[in-house]
Amino acid sequence: MRSQRAWVYPGLGILVACLGVVQQLGSPGDEHLAMALCACLIGGGAVIGLPAAPLAALGVLLVVDAGYQVAFGDPPFATFLATMIAMFHLARSTTRRTMLLGYAATLVALIIMDVVVSIRGLDSPAGVIIPIVYFGAAGGLGGLVRHTANYARIARERAEALEREQAHLTELAAAAERARIARELHDVISHSVSLMVLQAEAAREVIDTQPGLTAQVLDGIGETGRRAIGDLRNLLGVLRSNEDAVPADLSTLLEPVRLTGLNIDLIESGEPIPIPLRPAVYRIVQEALTNALKHAAASKVVVTVRHDDAGVTLEVVDDGPGAPQPAGGSGRGLAGMAERVQALGGTLSTQHLTPAGFRVLAQLPVQP
């Protein structure tokens, strides 16, 4: 495109020069033929030099026009046409300062030419109006082309910016989705596997003395495994349908954990959990119980769920002497809880209790 544009003004210059020469040669009896031909050639050369030195080229054209007018009369049409091209170029391609300087110089030259023809009685002072109209039209056309090009450039830049923003938002959405999937996988696998391990250890302790309880614990292991498979299946369904299919019944979560010997009390008050908050409540309780089993060495956990008009307040307190996340842990559990609560616009706080125990407190607002 640029290589094509590079030939525009040289081509116009050659065209103007050739047109002027042909026109002058076709006018027999011109006593100033040589000077007219020189003016046409100079006009064509000035057009060729417009991109490199617009003000200088326009100055040459104005000197040729005014000088020819003063010395010989009306200048050739080729120099007039070249001046119109120069006015178009000033409005189309130069700065505002260059354009104003060129317009001012053109106006001065026209006034000089008008004064000369008026003194000689060759034309009335109103004759300057015609060049002003033509040159003004050429400048206006150049300004219109420049405005259109700027508008197209701005629209193109805006479209490119929107594309970049869309790509950025897509990357952020993908990152958020990966983080969400990682939380779901952590909650499902970590809780279920930890629970199955603890149930298996409990079954080993009582296999010789309490066969009935052993069978019950083994059934719990099977149920936990089936529930883990179901949760993973639900997670795969979420990836396809973008819906959260996490179970909402806390009792289905607590019963298998009780088989490990952990005493769990569930205290609920108020209205049922709002549907949008149920998956988060389920997962937070699940992670808190997993931490209590794996890291806190707790014997009792109290789960409190309070509902009011503002939302849901969830509290999980254990009596274990150990920290919920030792140095060897991955740290994903508490981080995942914090991400869930933050995504819902809520707050999460954790606290080591004295002399023992750990507390998880989440407040989830009801979304409008």
Image: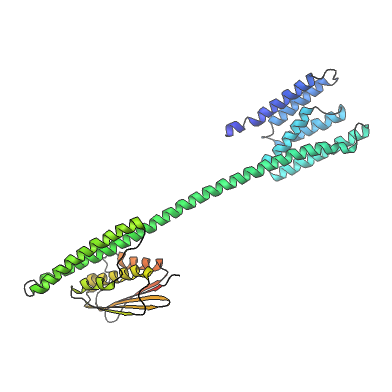
Q: Where residue 362 sits in the image (x, y, percent)?
A: 36, 74
Residue under the point 75% across and 21% down: 22
Q: Where residue 355 sits in the image (x, y, percent)?
A: 27, 82
Whether residue 328 is visible, yes or no, is no
- Is 297 or 124 nearer to us in this picture? 124
Q: Give the quadrant of residue 90.
A: top right
Q: For the N terminus, which image quadrant?
A: top right
Residue under the point 78% across and 19% down: 25
Query: In this picture, is 368 found above or below 124?
Result: below
Query: In this picture, is 86 found above or below 184?
Result: above
Residue under the point 43% across and 53% down: 170
Query: In this picture, is 8 found above or below 201?
Result: above
Q: Where residue 187 sits in the image (x, y, percent)?
A: 28, 64
The residue lying furthest to the bottom in this view is 355
Q: For the C terminus, which image quadrant?
A: bottom left
Whether residue 180 is visible, yes or no, is yes
**Colouring rule applied to residues:** rainbow
The residue lying furthest to the top in this view is 28
Task: State left or right for residue 214 relative to residue 315.
Answer: left
Q: How many marks?
A: 0
Q: Where residue 77 sits in the image (x, y, percent)?
A: 79, 28
Task: State left or right for residue 86 relative to residue 270.
Answer: right
